[in-house]
Amino acid sequence: PSFEGWWFGNKLGGTQVWSHNASASLTPPPSGWKIPWDGTVRNTLSVANKADQQKNEAQMKLKNMTTEVNSVSTAAKGALDQAKAAAADYTSSEGLKEAETLLQPQLSALAEAMKQLTDAQRAGSNQETLRQVQQMRSGLQALMSAINVELGKVRSSKQKAEQSEK
């Protein structure tokens, strides 16, 4: 009974033992390890299955990416609405300048978010994660397209407005 459970040491069958867990499970338990082997249980050591750990890390990255993409998208949509309101009937050069000022920085933020999604897609992962990344990319592409269209309209209208004011 004194040799039952799980042991960590310098080698299989070795005499140098660092940690012990009395569990009789078929896989190493995640917690409950004594360090040193005859000491008290320490919560500083946890054992995890590598595949489970990678899956959890991928889920956390996806969650963080989703939060970032949602934040960038919300800001860009807000700026697009504000720019349309500022441009109004596309005749006031001041309103058009304001609209351009609102839209231009959003393209950089969206491009950076798109780059992060592209990198995540290249790194590969499970099919569900790749599907979600592709879905976010599609949403960002549509938003970037809408901003580019509006920015083009604003810039051409701004040129016309400035020429008519001369």
Image (cartoon, helix red, strand yellow):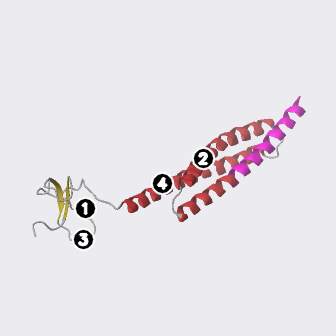
- In front of the other: 111 or 17: 17
Query: CA gap, disc 1 to disc 2?
Result: 39 Å
Q: Is residue 90 above or below residue 132?
A: above
Query: CA gap, disc 1 to disc 3?
Result: 12 Å
Element carrying mark 2: helix
Kindly identify which residue carries mark 1: 31
Kindly identify which residue carries mark 3: 25
**Main SS class of the magenta portion in the image:** helix
- In front of the other: 89 or 105: 105
Mark 1 or mark 2: whose residue is earlier in sequence: 1
Q: For the residue marked with disc 4, what is the amino acid?
A: Lys
Q: Are marks 1 and 3 in contact (CB under 8 Å)?
A: no
* Residue 4 falls left or right of residue 165: left
Give the number of the disc on residue 61. 4
Q: Where, quadrant-wise, is the N terminus in this rendering?
A: bottom left
Mark 2 or mark 4: whose residue is earlier in sequence: 4
Query: CA gap, disc 2 to disc 4?
Result: 15 Å
Q: For the residue marked with disc 1, what is the amino acid?
A: Ser
Q: Are marks 1 and 2 in contact (CB under 8 Å)?
A: no
Kindly identify which residue carries mark 2: 115
Element carrying mark 3: loop
Task: Locate residue 12, reporting x and y percent.
Answer: 21, 58
* Residue 45 falls left or right of residue 40: right
Q: Are marks 3 and 4 in contact (CB under 8 Å)?
A: no
Q: For the residue marked with disc 2, what is the amino acid?
A: Lys
Q: What residue is drawn where x is 51% and y is 59%? A: 125
Task: Locate residue 129, reporting x and y percent.
Answer: 53, 61
- Per the rendered image, the range of residues in magenta is 142-166
Mark 1 or mark 4: whose residue is earlier in sequence: 1
